[in-house]
Image (tube, grey):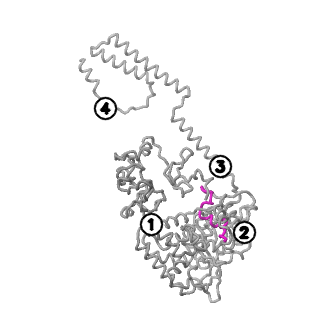
Amino acid sequence: MALRYSINEFREDITFTVPQEIKPAVPYVTRVQQEVQTKVVAALEAGLPLSDAATETIQAVMRRVASSVAAAEDGADGGQLNSEVVHEQEAEEEQEQEAEQEEQRVSAYSRDDEHPRPWRASQLACDPTAVPAGDAAFYPVSRFRCRPQHKALATLPRSLQMSDNAFRLSWCGVGDRRLKNTVVFLEWCEVERKPDETTHGKSRFYGVITLAEAETLRWLIHHCGLVNERCAFALRLLSTGAAMDQSSLLGSLTTRCPAGEGGLTVADARLFFRFLDNDMFFDEPDLERLEAGALRSVPDRELRAQFFEETLRLRRRHRQQWDDTPVARLLLPPEDDDDESADATKDASKADAAPKVLSAVDVNSRAAYRRMRVIFSRNDAKRAAATKRLREAAAAAAKVPDAAGATVSASTDDAALDAAQLPVPMVAAVIAPLLRPALAQRDVATALAHGQPRDPACAHGGNTLSIAWLERSLFTAPAAKPAPAESEGAAQQPQTAETPAAAGEAPANQEDEEQEWSCPMCSGRNPWCVERCDFCESAKPKKPKSGGPALDPWPCPTCTFINEGTSRYCAMCNTDSGRDVGGADAAASAAALTGHMEVPEGYWVCAPEKGGCSKFNPNSQFYCEVCDRSRPDLATLRF
């Protein structure tokens, strides 16, 4: 009987009875007492009486259970909050604070009279300046200004228009108004109908519109035949200039519509609307076209800068600083030309004091220029071919007068040809075939115009180049190591494999001159003759001062990064390679053990203690590539 009772304790009842009603919850202590009482009765029935010690043990356990449950209930009644409740309250408080801040930002701008005003689509068939003022849907951008103190670009062509729903002139002077971003712009032509039922385009206009207006016009194109027959217009994307949709009449005009006032084309209008939308990043050809197009009528750069800053202030943009971007070339005063009659020292001081904006175009052109030097320094045949082709081009140009009626040179002598000034496009067209496929002709021309170092031999501010200057600055061969000189009393020993070169020197023999060094930042392979990486502009690492054989670069088995042969730990993930490098990698070993990596040469760190992301950015970048925080020393940096 006792054995059966003991075995039954380990049996599990597989039956399950669904209760007919929901019984009230039984307190935990009561359920434990009922279970103990049931077990005690079953033990007595099985002939297993409880001893006094067992009874005291059961009573002691029950007292502890009761006290624990009472303590837990007292704690809950006392209002003690667990961690989850605290976190929920903190999250709710943060959301409320963010909502309040957003409400304050929104309330700082006026929202009165923002309902859209309807206008007739028939206005797209006529000159917008001829529409009565009360019914006009567009007005010239030359009248646009955000507040009375804000000067408008009053000399802009009238072919540049702005929708009344994008920004109303009545909003000026009644508080700041958040400017809408431009995504789509409108192109339309004034249509003239002849008695013979032919349609002719008279003048072309371009306008900034809202997204709601763009969607409405698209609906009219596909559902309203009358608009397609009487109006010639197209919706174009600001980002690419491609036509989203257009009416059927625009492509079937009997006489093609001419360009807008001042000869503005669709491309010119798109670039200006990008400028109006406070786009800061333009390519070099776009900057030149914008300067010669829509902004040609606004020569005052100070007025341009004030207009750009005022509109940028009213836009919700993460970046508000523009003076280190390509658009600054349109807003800042141009650098003064060098006066040949002025003193050289005075010119040098002016050049040092003049602010220089380092744009993305300048950085890319300098990298392309260094790439050209690398290619020519490693190939004697290309250097000779480039010089020969340039002399032939100079000799041919000497026989044909230019547009001004003057010739480049009157002699075919090599010295005279080398001193002749050749236009940059001509030089690029001659040497570009020697640089393919590494560089295209357009990249070569940009590098020669903007990436070259300033040199007195380069006349006209970089528009022309001489063959002599190219041979001295671009067509350069690797520098040969001078023979060791003997000192008084003892001759200096020649350098061998056991006597390494000083840090940063070129290899001794011609075979070593063809060697390459690996960039510690991007693992790019560069010729020994260059001091900076051709890909990321990192400085060439110095050779170890300790003796011993040279160590080859090794790939990390964890992240595949190619590390310098003198390092034992991976520069990316700190994986230990187990290589015997002596004391050359002591700093890297200490960094791997402490977890703190030193900032590489030529880079700056986005400091995490100041809210940064710890990203290593090259010195050519003024803002972090990851979190867009500014460089710590940007305020004191001289351009």
Three-letter code, disc 3: Glu
N-terminal of the two: label 3 or label 4?
Answer: 4
Above or below 544: residue 340: below
x then y, percent, for residue 308? 66, 63
Q: Earlier in the sequence, mark 1 or mark 2?
A: 2
Amino acid type assigned to the residue bearing label 1 in the image: Val
Q: On the picture, is 550 further left or further right than 259?
A: left
Residue annotated with mark 3:
103
Q: Answer with left or right where residue 478 lies relative to residue 220.
A: left
**In the depicted view, which residue is nearer to us: 628 or 406?**
406
Q: What's the distance in space between the residues labelled 3 and 1, CA to CA? A: 57 Å
Secondary structure under the numbered disc 2 in the rendered image = helix
Q: Is residue 318 on the magenta stretch? A: yes
Nearer to us of marks 4 and 2 is: 2
Pointer 4 or 1: first along the chain:
4
Secondary element at image label 1: helix
Residue assigned mark 2: 143
Residue 235 visible to an observer of this rendering:
no
Q: Which residue is the site of mark 4?
A: 15
